[in-house]
Image: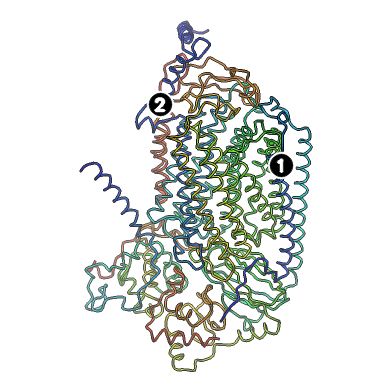
Amino acid sequence: MIPQRVKQEDERLARERAKLARDGPKLKGAKLEARLERTWRRPPGILGWLATVDHKEIGRRYIVTALIFLALGGALAAVMRLQLAVPDNNLVGAQRYNELFTMHGSTMMFLFAVPVMEGVAVFIIPLMLGTRSTAFPRLNAFSYYMYVFGGLLLWGAFALNIGPDVGWFAYTPLSGPQFSPGKRADVWAQMITFTEVSALAAAVVLVCTILKTRAPGMTLARMPLFAWAMLVVAVMIIFSMPAVALCSSMLISDRLIGTNFYNAYEHGDALLWQHLFWFFGHPEVYIIFLPATGFVSVITETFCRRPIFAYPVVVLALISTGILAFGLWVHHMFATGLPRVGYSFYTSASMTVAIPTALQIFCWLATMWDGRPRLQVPMLYVIGFIVIFVIGGLTGVIIASVPLDLELHDTYFIVAHFHYVLIGGAVFPLLGILTYWFPKITGRMMSETLGKIGFWMLFLGFQLAFFPMHFAGLLGMPRRVYTYPAGLGLELPNLLSTVGAFVVASAVVLFVINGLFSLYRGTIAPQNPWGATSLEWATASPPPPYNFAHIPVVESRTPLWDAKGELPVVTGLRVDEKEILLTTVVAAAPDLREPVPEPSLWPLIAAIAVGVLFVSSIFSPWAVVFGAIPAAIATAAWFWPKELKRHPEPVIS
Amino acid sequence: MSIQHYQSIFGNAATETRQFNTLFVIFLVVCAIMYLAVIAFLILGLVRRRRSDAANTVEEGRHHDSNPRMQAGLIGWAAVVGTGLVALAIASFVADRSMAVAAAHEKLSITVTANQWWWDVQYNAADNSKMVRTANEIHLPVGVPVHIYLKSNDVIHSFWVPSLAGKQDLIPGRENDITITPRKLGIYRGQCAEFCGAEHAKMALVVDVDSYSDFIKWWRHQLEEAAPPATPLAKAGYAFVTSRNCGACHAIAGTPASGTVGPDLTHLASRRTLAASMPMGEGNLYGWVADPQSIKPGTRMPTIGLEPDQLHAVVAYLETLK
Amino acid sequence: MSSPWRVSLVAIGLAALALAGCNREERHSRSKPIGETVPAGTSPDTIWPGGTVAQTADPRARLYDNNAPAIAAGQQLYTQMNCVGCHSHGGGGMGPALMDDQWRYGGRIDQIATTIAEGRPNGMPSWRSKLTEDQIWKLAAYVRSLSGQPSKDAVASRAESMSSTTPQTLTPREPAHTSDTAAQ
């Protein structure tokens, strides 16, 4: 029996619920937009800026911060190339050079490549999926702050002349307590902890957003390929990052309190580090590459004026690449003396992973064949990607073979290989997609002329910088050397690489100038300047804080191209409280209305507390105990339910 | 003396690298064919003439259609790529196995222990009086398979002489090994190929492949003790070297100096390189003994701060250690 | 102060901080020539007649005492020069223990360096002619870490070898008592 009092309360709440304002057939147009704007905009001022949970703001911050780190890492590379321009050079000493390449690799891999992909995804995925917010927006904010603090830790240490000098993968026992005295290697290991926590948080946000917040009708089979790529990448992050967190924490433990994880003389193993690191490290490079394949799919689709050929094949290629990537890591360890028969398995696996990528490439090329390609700047970057990345992939097939790798491992041939796949395979699509989504992010178009000049400078400069490195490796130049002797034939390849490096640097500077110039003087962008088909182009450029006035309904893989006239929409979400529509995982049938949290400073405060915990645990093990207290308090405050009285509908404050 | 340093992977001077070259060419050819196929497809897709209504684009309302032969193309492409990769994997495996088979029947055994940043080379022998210890240099007889045991005293290094064989890591706590069968006379240079700290770039080694009789001559000479000094300057140098700092770390057979921390100096002056990075010569000896920290900062050998006459004496003595 | 001044002062302060580096991490690979470890006329311990406790700290103490690369180099030298033969890994044997709080000849770094350079009665050899001053001071820095004297962020927790002591980052700090308590 329900008590009378409760029944009356229920009826009162039901009456109140009926009076709530919702976006709907009656409330639409400018009036709706004004009310949504009021609800969804964040508080003004510095505190509001710090407390934001708007995925577009967080995504922009990620991208800007990552591009700053790209510039910093590139500056280091320029100094390295100057040192290597001539043999027996003394521009930079051995110790400083070792710090330079450690910082260059760590910055590019941990502070640029993965965060920029996350940032672009965080910005565009909710728009592409037709929703108003990511899942867990405060976790999203926390992830950005953890990333920034990790970057500040690493670069702050470098500026204070205590930067790491053990290489970006810090093999033990060189990075162990005896051979890396001081705190340099601890700073590196703790930076890993920051960026890994950040990446895990962003991955959780992306998985939940992609699986639960898609527009009604956007079944998994109709989801844009970029969203598929980010789904696979986010799952890969969740499975791979813990390995690197574990090995870096074990390294800190060895260095801080004398455990013996990597001490061969006390039944530890120096190779344990390599296994754990590369179990993360190999999926890491696919975590960087797969979003770029998503970019390529997006650009190719728009600029060839048709959807990608064989969509199911591309999806299966993404998924199988993601799975296979976890079975390759020993190809980084072919020289360590592990059993030879085991190596053959990794050779085969490394070659197998080329097959899904080769199929993706076929599908893109088939799309170009079938469509009518428009050679604007983003498409140029896609073509550059194909030309460069495939070379890198094929040199990868070469070094997958054990006898060949035993000669080529740890030489400049490998440096050439990974720059071809990382710059060709990730940076080219990234610059293309930044040009493509620049109007959506900022409301203005980038300059097409400057873009074309920048593309050609980058393409030709890249070839000049990195193609000769194949020869340097074949002539016997190992990696991570601060100088080389004259008389081995290494002078010419190194000089060419140095010249090319500066051309590449100029191209990147030109891209940034183009971006800054266009930000203030670029042509104002219409809603859909490229005539594209996915949902982010169904709203203004830049989008209002609430993304869409009404949640769109999707009936095909190419919604904007197939909608006759206006897009169909669903109505009924509240306008005076923030909420999004959750849909079912596979069929995207409307399921629940989920309240969205208000802007909050607790993610920042929690990030500061956790950051203090991590940084002070570099110096003392007690920090783990005492630092956990503020972190626990901040997290508890973050999750504390605000009010217990019954609302007509639940809210999250 | 003028030295030919030869560090190319295509040096083709041993059985192991001969197979490398063949395999590399096979891979290069297959990969080049695949690359050209991709580029041809790309270019054709971009430049082919399309009749004004022929493309399957959204403007023409046919964006959901595709060329009927494209699916067959996809399957064909997958088959070609798959077959190519399988062929390459089999070629790689066959080459690997044949290199391993060739690595049987070793006649000579060497232990190389890597330190930061020099190579400790020891020729193993059943009888201790026949063991030769030297540093940063290996002499090998042509045509004889040699088994090299690889150990490390500190961090991970990598033994790599490109013209002779692929690399193998030296990992503390593990004993790895590599077999080399040199086939061409000559001098080959190698370098440490795993980042091992500050002076990783200056950890080279030289492999001298001699005829069998020359090798035996060299080996017999290495077994001899250091000749006593003849000139007064060399005698003064001998006095300093055996009674002061040098003997704490270095060993010279036939003298009281018997430290094992640093390289063996018994036949220092007959080696081709000094400090794993410089050609052997009087000037370099002066520079190294006077101030090793300015040549290889961070190296374990300290700058002793010799007086000029001490320096002259020490170098004069070291030059007698042929 | 007006706002531009304050901003530039902060910037200068940060730049100075940045250029200062950190003494813990400084690598000193160049050493001074062998010579007197101790200036003639004063001995930093009170065992020998005429000895006084040095009024000013030896300037080299600052370079080596809490310097992580120096302590790490000292750790390697300790094994390579066979200090283990008499002192074990700090527990002592033929020679006195180095990880306790008893220092016959003083536990300051310059006093330990003098001990190593000069030798001492009852078996401590003189290393002055065998090791450079730089090496001796590095050994002295490491010896101090066996009793937990340096700050814990400068010591290495363990060596890459069989475990023989408590990890030095967890070694409790022993007070450095000299035999002559009046002097300290």
Q: Nearer the viewer, residue C132 or B80?
A: B80
Residue B309 appears left or right of A234:
left
How crowded pointer 1 is (Cα within 10 Å; few <14, some 14-19, many 20+) is rated as: some
Q: Can you say which quadrant of the picture contains the N terminus of chain B?
A: bottom right
Q: Which amino acid does label 1 sit on?
A: Leu
Disc 2 target residue: A42
Q: How many marks?
A: 2
- Residue C123 visible in the current orientation: no
Q: Which of B255 and A384 is in front in this view?
A: A384
The residues bearing labels 2 and 1 have C-alpha atoms spaced at a distance of 51 Å
Are the residues under marks 2 and 1 on the same chain?
no
Q: Position of residue B74 (x, y in %)?
A: 75, 39
Disc 1 target residue: B44
User: Which residue sits furthest left?
Assistant: C1
Q: Chain for mark 2? A: A
State the SS at label 1: helix
